[in-house]
Amino acid sequence: MWREYLRSVALSLLIALVLGAQVSPANHLDGVVRGGIAAGIYPGAVVVVGRSDSVLLARGYGHLTWSSSSPIPSPDSSLYDLASLTKVLATAPAVMRLVEAGRLRLTDPVQQHLSEFAGPGKEAVTVAHLLSHTSGLRAFLPLNELAQDAETARHLVFEEPLRWPPGRRVEYSDLNALLLGWIVERLSGQPLDEFVSAEIFRPLGMSQTHFRPPRSAWPRTAPVGVWRGSPVAGTVHDQNAARFGGVAGHAGLFSTGQDLARYAQFLLNQGRGSDCRVVLQPVTVALFARRWSGNRTLGFELEDTTSADNSGVRLTAAAFGHTGFTGTSLWIDPERDLFVIMLTNRVYAPRASRSITRIKVLRGLVADAAAGLVDGGPSAAARVARC
């Protein structure tokens, strides 16, 4: 089914070219997203595409579950488990805020703020190493299996030995983000969710972005699993985040397409909100968005022009973003003045095998179609600044 779907997409474009027909990027994008539903990769999706001052496309597709009687996803109100997008929507901007305030430096040893992070070589691990995934820590620990409570799980992370010398190798690791979240809490004196809500989400008007969504929001939350035959919605999919009560530096955040669009525009506007309020300084945003090591910035992943996976081939080399295991993604291209958001719950009873591999291809196709929406328009440099 999957190969047939990809062939049908390619064939439709080829026929259009031969006949001289015009296939609009929006229609092409619609076909790609709906094709993912037909291929059984996810039951529904939300896609939002826009620029620093406008939203060009905001649509919901399919349903929150495989049942046609379940709600149609809404860009404005449907909540999705963002998984690892938490790293760039909560943890990274929280660190930006502390760096900007002079309370944290990128060169600070992690041990300066978390003395419990002890062991051979760990004295050389810095905040920048955590942000760029060059700390030397392994990618993952099954904390939900190894620890019976949050405190024990926390100590396991502190005690985890380095696998490589700091700065030697890029190894994407949830442990880095967990440590960053605890640094934020130690320096701010607040839980991560409270700090980032006060410092980032509320100033940006992101009223529907939070950890542990209230029960009243569960009916409009895309479920991420099934328990005894019923959809499970509102509970974080990541079991390590669940071990920490649903609030962690690497996962746990829920949000809507509309709120993510506000965040993307905040980054495109170099730290300003929709009301032109300066939430973070332009120099801070620029620092965290530039290449730091390999294909990593300080928190984000850079667009990979060698592969169509995740970000396609039409975004510029300046593009940065992130993806989430549940089927979410956010890409921002400052040179095109473009953002593209895709939210799915592909972990909910997927009907296709290897859904994580297949959604990478779809993300790339969506990103390429989104680039087509702004092709021919004024470049980011030519556009008049909104603020």
Image (tube, grey):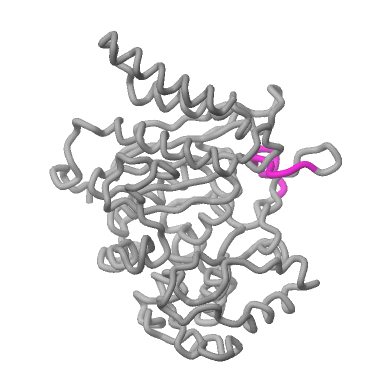
**Residue located farthest toward the left when viewing the structure as drawn:** 382
Residue at the location (42% across, 34% down)? Answer: 366
Residue at the location (77% across, 73% down)? Answer: 147
Span colored in magenta: 215-226
Q: Quadrant of the image for the N terminus? A: top right
Vertical arrangement, residue 235 with respect to residue 154, above or below:
above
Residue 153 picture quarter: bottom right
Q: Is residue 139 left or right of residue 368?
A: right
Residue 9 picture quarter: top left
Residue at the location (62% across, 40% down)? Answer: 354
Q: Nearer the viewer, residue 243 or 32?
A: 32
Magenta-drawn stretch contains 148:
no
Q: Is residue 68 left or right of residue 335?
A: right
Vertical arrangement, residue 2 with respect to residue 286, above or below:
above
* Position of residue 52 measured from the top left corner of the image (x, y, whole percent): 29, 45
* Position of residue 379 measured from the top left corner of the image (x, y, whole percent): 18, 41
**Residue located farthest toward the top when viewing the structure as drawn:** 19
Q: Is residue 202 left or right of residue 148?
A: left
Magenta-drawn stretch contains 217:
yes
Report the number of discs. Answer: 0
* Position of residue 359 measured from the top left corner of the image (x, y, whole percent): 53, 39
Residue at the location (29% across, 8% down)? Answer: 19
Q: Is residue 86 left or right of residue 354?
A: left
